[in-house]
Amino acid sequence: MVEAAANMAHTEMQARYDVHNPTALKQLVAAKTQLVQFPTSVLDAAYKHSMDIYSELNAKNPRWKKVYTDYAKFRSEQNQWFRFTEATFDRYMQGKKA
């Protein structure tokens, strides 16, 4: 029952996120908000800091380490998959004006 409730809550939250964000973006643009992407240097710094935190947690908490090790492997495999499938299609569709 807890698993079913968690799945439903996740699905509901993701659906709301996906449906409301385009409208919010349009409102920002209409208000003349300047939208910019994070520079790679900021993303690199955030990534490095995250990896440092994960390393500290790995050293201090064996339960964290077990979960994170499995998750990091999964994430790496998913990133490889998405790089050649969904990401390619997403880039293609984002270039369309339809």
Image (cartoon, rainbow, N blue to C red):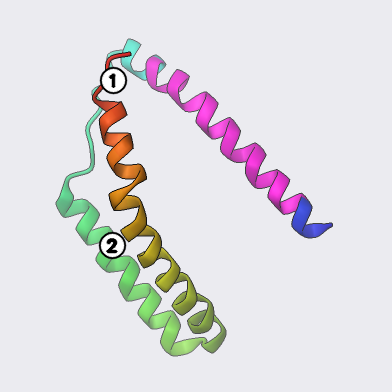
Q: Quadrant of the N terminus?
A: bottom right
Residue 24 on the magenta span? yes
Q: Locate residue 93: give its quadrant.
A: top left
Q: Nearer the viewer, residue 65 or 59?
A: 65
Callout 1: SS: loop
Confirm whether the magenta stretch covers residue 62: no
For residue 74, above or below residue 13: below
Q: Considering only vertical position in the picture, is 37 above or below 32?
A: below
Tell me residue 46's x, y (percent): 28, 59
In the image: residue 53, left or right of residue 12: left
Count residues near mark 1 (Cα–Cα under 10 Å), then give few for <14, some for 14-19, many for 20+.
few
Q: Which one is in front, 84 or 71? A: 84
At x 53%, y 89%, the residue is: 62
Which residue carries the number 2 mark?
47
Q: Which residue is mark 1?
A: 33
State whether the magenta stretch is mostly helix, strand or loop.
helix
The amino acid type found where label 2 is placed reads Tyr
Q: Where 12 falls versus 40 (above or below)?
A: above
Residue at 32% across, 36% down: 89
SS at mark 2?
Answer: helix
State the image coordinates of residue 27 (x, y, percent, origin top left).
40, 15
Q: Nearer the viewer, mark 2 or mark 1?
A: 2
- Chain part drawn in magenta: 5-26
Mark 2: give few (<14), some (14-19) or many (20+) Cα within 10 Å. Answer: few
* In-front residue for pair 95/8: 95
Under mark 1, the amino acid is Thr
